[in-house]
Image: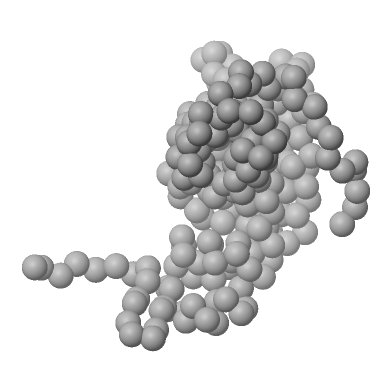
Amino acid sequence: MSEWNTKITSIKPNEILIRGYAVEEIMEKLSYAEVVYLIIKGELPTPEEGRVFQAVLTSSVDHGVTPPSALATLNSTSTGAPLNAAVASGLLAINSFHGGAIEDSMKLYLKAAEFTGNTLDESKIEEFVKMKFEQKFKFPGFGHRVHTEDPRSIKLTELCMKNLPENKLFYIKLAKIIEEKIFTAKGIKLPVNVDGMIGAVLLALEIPAELANGIFMISRVPGLLAHYYEEKKTQKPMRNIDQKSAVYDGPSKRSI
């Protein structure tokens, strides 16, 4: 059998190295977000990058019962599907129109950067936005069916400005300028939503666009687990699930 190479994990008797770091040291010293960053990129984030990436992972942990991934998990659970199948159903619902806007927004920003010569020249960005409207282009990562101002996007922007160095802020600023120029061009407010800002952050952290849906999946799995367990424990099997009839009866708003 011919040999082949992997740089991710080394397994030997009594030793587990993940990207060269002993798993017991990782367990003691790193957050989960830092470990995800490490195993994907091969090197540890700075503490500031780790804080931003942690915010990315927590920002999309759940968005209620209405997203397709949650409904797919609920429906599968209601049929008696086991945990792995129910959660897998939710993950399989994450595609071009649910979660996919992250990758699409990253491609948009890269094209905008190419158009402007990797500058934040507002006149060129405005020209780019107008050109896209002329092409009947729909801006991925902008606007939201529920939020007029996405609180997750606002917080991610704030954390990036606070933690990332100036040379890492290009795509964060580009996203916000595109938001402004959409309003200038059409008089409509389409604020950067969480997908659009996650896309900008992933570019800032140099995480490949083809992994964007995977990052969203990592974020969303805990929410799917929660929906699976609640459905199994509180609802009858094989029910007709109308998302709009769901009534939240959990804790009222509270602070950490």
Q: Residue at x 50, y 67 (%)?
A: 38
Specify whether 227 is left or right of 189: left
Q: Which colour scheme is used?
A: one colour
Q: Is residue 244 above or below residue 204?
A: above
- Nearer the observer, 14 or 63: 14
Q: Which residue is drawn at 54% across and 13% down?
A: 136
Quadrant for residue 131, please give it: top right
Residue 102 appears in the picture as rendered: yes
Quadrant of the frame with the N terminus: bottom left
Specify whether 105 is left or right of 256: left
- Nearer the observer, 76 or 8: 76
Q: In this view, does 70 lie above or below 14?
A: above
- Please state the horizontal and vertical placement of residue 251, each as a whole percent of the image: 87, 43
Quadrant of the frame with the C terminus: bottom right
Residue 68 appears in the picture as rendered: no
Q: Which residue is drawn at 37% across and 71% down?
A: 9
- Nearer the observer, 17 or 178: 17
- Please state the horizontal and vertical placement of residue 83, each as a whole percent of the image: 51, 44
Q: Residue furthest front?
A: 236
Q: Which residue is drawn at 51% across and 15% down?
A: 135
Q: Which residue lies furthest to the bottom in this view?
A: 14
Quadrant for residue 51, please give it: bottom right
Quadrant for residue 126, please give it: top right
Q: In this view, does 167 lie above or below 94?
A: below
- Please state the horizontal and vertical placement of residue 145, each as a whole percent of the image: 70, 22
- Please state the horizontal and vertical placement of residue 199, each as a whole percent of the image: 58, 42
